[in-house]
Image: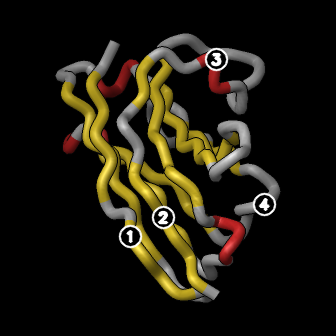
């Protein structure tokens, strides 16, 4: 288990940008594969993006591909989500998550064992 804290959420106009951060309280951050998920009211939690331990491989949901960028700084024990060209349908609580084991389905929330408390992102039209 690793303690995760997200920050950077807030209100932004459609077409704008926002950067989310997730700080991990661990000295072994490099053993964790990291992901971002989001959950809108009345909807299930959905996969947004993931990044490998070394940051060499990234994955994106089709809905955010080309607009969002996931990155990590292992020296700072942090993972980021740069969100550009935001749309009202991007409104949700955004969570970062960690897992140790490689898995076949990186988009399944059940494969992640540690979660942050979430940060609200609201995109106004």
Q: Earlier in the sequence, mark 4 or mark 2?
A: 4
Q: Earlier in the sequence, mark 2 or mark 1?
A: 1
Report the Cα–Cα distance between label 4 and label 1.
Answer: 20 Å
Q: Which residue is mark 4?
A: 63
Q: Which residue is mark 1?
A: 10
Element class at badge 2: strand
Element class at badge 3: helix
Point out which mark residue 110 bears. Answer: 3
Point out which mark residue 112 bears. Answer: none
Report the Cα–Cα distance between label 4 and label 2.
Answer: 16 Å
Report the Cα–Cα distance between label 2 and label 3.
Answer: 23 Å
Q: Earlier in the sequence, mark 2 or mark 3?
A: 3
The reply to whether discs 3 and 1 touch (Cβ–Cβ < 8 Å) is no
Left or right of 57, for residue 105: right
- The structure residue drawn at horizontal position 36% and vertical position 37%, both measured from the top left corner, is 117
Q: Which residue is mark 2?
A: 121
Q: Earlier in the sequence, mark 3 or mark 1?
A: 1
Q: Which quadrant of the view contains residue 21?
A: bottom left
Report the Cα–Cα distance between label 2 and label 1.
Answer: 5 Å
The reply to whether discs 2 and 1 touch (Cβ–Cβ < 8 Å) is yes
- The structure residue drawn at horizontal position 44% and vertical position 73%, both measured from the top left corner, is 18
Q: Residue 64, position in %: x, y?
A: 71, 62
Q: Say which quadrant the N terminus sits in.
A: top left
- The structure residue drawn at horizontal position 53% and vertical position 69%, both measured from the top left corner, is 83
Q: Residue 57, position in %: x, y?
A: 61, 41
Q: Earlier in the sequence, mark 3 or mark 4?
A: 4
Q: Nearer the viewer, mark 4 or mark 2?
A: 2
Q: Nearer the viewer, residue 6 or 71?
A: 6
């Amino acid at each position: 288990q690793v303690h995760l804290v997200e920050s950077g959420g807030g209100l932004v106009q459609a077409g704008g940008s926002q950067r989310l951060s997730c700080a991990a309280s661990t000295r072994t951050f490099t053993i964790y594969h990291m992901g971002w998920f989001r959950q809108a009211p009345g909807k299930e939690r959905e996969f947004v993006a993931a990044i490998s331990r070394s940051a060499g491989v990234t994955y994106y949901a089709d809905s955010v591909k080309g607009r969002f960028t996931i990155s990590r700084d292992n020296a700072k024990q942090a993972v980021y989500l740069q969100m550009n060209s935001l749309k009202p349908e991007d409104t949700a609580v955004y969570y970062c998550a960690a897992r140790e084991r490689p898995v076949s389905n990186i988009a399944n929330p059940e494969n992640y064992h540690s979660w942050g408390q979430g940060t609200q992102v609201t995109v106004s039209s």
